[in-house]
């Protein structure tokens, strides 16, 4: 994987190449403290959601943790949606509560332990069984497991990759939304784009 200079996005946020609205949103994400007191999920549900998100997008190799579960809790607490859902799915609120219940139910059936106590390999097996509609448990009779997995993974990725730290990791500077993009040929970079180390 290509490496870019640390602080690329954070440095760019301090320039006049980013609009005020974009800067405010990204700085808010940078300054956010990890959620310790969920307002939608119960403490038990939230701990489980954190374990699932950490398995979907492991962050053990980074010093700065991006709080994916906290972002989901905040969205659901504020009753926000992305404006659509599959007709086979219940509301986001109900889907998350059922989905988390189903994850732990499958873990208990397959390994006789809650999801959070399983090894990384076992957790991966549970999540794959949900993704491929093979998860055991009564809950999955009321919630399409593959749709829940798809929605959860998409939201986790959206929260993760919309955070300035993740943008820095992949060298994305598209949020520099004031200037136009002039160098649009293959392998042509704008001066503001990071160069590989």
Image (cartoon, rainbow, N blue to C red):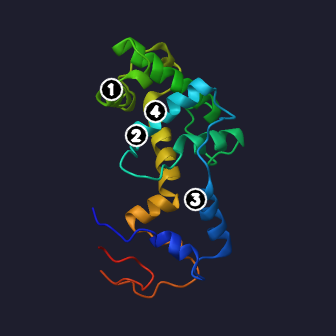
Earlier along the polypeptide chain: callout 3 or callout 2? 3
Q: Secondary structure at mark 3?
A: helix
Report how far apart the C-alphas of labels 2 and 1 lie in the structure: 14 Å
Q: Residue 27: in sight, yes or no?
A: yes
Crowding at dot 4, Cα within 10 Å, few <14 / some 14-19 / many 20+, comes out as: some
Q: CA distance from mark 1 to mark 3?
A: 31 Å
Q: Residue 45: percent from the left, percent from the top?
A: 57, 26
**Residue nearer the viewer, 77 or 54:** 54
In this rendering, which labeled residue sits more in front, label 2 or label 1? 1
In whole angstroms, how far apart are the C-alphas of marks 1 and 4? 11 Å
Question: Is disc 3 surrounded by few (<14), some (14 to 19) or many (20+) residues within 10 Å?
Answer: some
The residue pinned by badge 3 equals 30
Q: CA distance from mark 3 to mark 2?
A: 21 Å
Residue occupying image coordinates x 58% and y 59%? 30
Residue 18 x, y percent position in the rendering = 59, 77
Q: Residue at x 42, y 86 (%)?
A: 191
Q: Secondary structure beneath disc 1?
A: loop
Ranked by sequence position, the earlier of labels 2 and 1 is 2
Residue of label 2: 56
Q: Which residue is mark 4?
A: 51
Quick one: quadrant of the C terminus?
A: bottom left
| Crowdedness near tag 2: few (<14), some (14–19) or many (≥20) residues, C-alpha within 10 Å | some
Mark 4 or mark 2: which comes first in sequence?
4
Label 4 SS: helix
């Amino acid at each position: 994987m290509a490496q870019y200079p640390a602080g690329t996005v954070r440095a760019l946020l301090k320039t006049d190449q980013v609009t005020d609205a974009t800067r405010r949103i990204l700085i808010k994400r940078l300054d956010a403290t990890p959620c310790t007191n969920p307002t939608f999920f119960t403490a038990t549900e939230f701990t489980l959601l954190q374990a699932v998100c950490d398995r979907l997008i492991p962050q053990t190799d980074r010093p700065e943790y991006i709080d994916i579960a906290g972002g989901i809790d905040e969205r659901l607490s504020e009753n926000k949606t992305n404006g659509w859902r599959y007709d086979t799915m219940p509301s986001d609120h109900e889907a998350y509560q059922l989905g988390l219940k189903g994850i732990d139910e499958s873990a208990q059936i397959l390994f006789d332990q809650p999801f959070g106590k399983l090894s990384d390999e076992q957790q991966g097996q549970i999540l794959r069984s949900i993704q491929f509609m093979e998860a055991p448990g009564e809950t999955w009779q009321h919630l399409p497991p593959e749709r829940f997995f798809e929605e959860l993974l998409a939201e986790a990725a959206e929260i993760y990759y919309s955070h300035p730290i993740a943008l820095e990791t992949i060298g994305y500077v598209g949020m520099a939304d004031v200037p136009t993009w002039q160098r649009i040929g293959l392998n042509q970079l704008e001066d503001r784009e990071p160069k590989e180390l």
